Amino acid sequence: MNGQIYKAFRVSFTEAWYQLSKAEQDRLLGKVRDAIEKVGGKSIALCDSSWSSEEWLAFGLEVYPDMAAAKKHTELLAELNWFRYCKSSTLLGTPVTM
């Protein structure tokens, strides 16, 4: 698939996340930020929803240059064991002109 890919996501942390020290959490979040930059992606928004949802603590929107970059980003997150520390729900899509 050619063209930009947008990823909307919702995320909450697992018990494994809360077992990490603050320094370990910060280090892991830094690696997650590095992973999106490595594939040419960009975080457009990250929002705190903990005040309005018991299930999802945050949600956000990211953009990738193409499907290969979005796929590679997921692979990099898996290498970091990111999905051990959070549960998420994602939706990929392409821009629509109205």
Image (tube, helix red, strand yellow):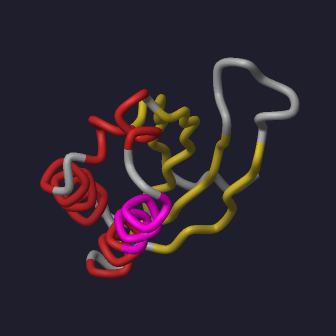
Q: In screen coordinates, is 74 left or right of 48?
A: left
User: What number of labels is visible?
Assistant: 0
> Residue 37: horizontal and vertical position, in percent?
37, 80
Name of the residue lying farthest toward the right: 51
Q: Residue 72's quadrant in the figure? A: bottom left
> Residue 76: horizontal and vertical position, in percent?
19, 60
> Residue 84: horizontal and vertical position, in percent?
27, 35
Q: In screen coordinates, is 50 left or right of 67?
A: right
Looking at the image, residue 69 lies above or below residue 88: below
Looking at the image, residue 96 lies above or below residue 17: below
Residue drawn where x is 60% and y is 54% of the image: 61
Q: Residue 10's quadrant in the figure? A: top right
Q: Is residue 25 in the magenta section?
A: yes
> Considering the image in quadrants, where does the N terminus appear?
bottom left
> Residue 33: horizontal and vertical position, in percent?
42, 72
Question: Closer to the camera, 22 or 69?
Answer: 22
Residues rendered magenta in the picture: 22-30
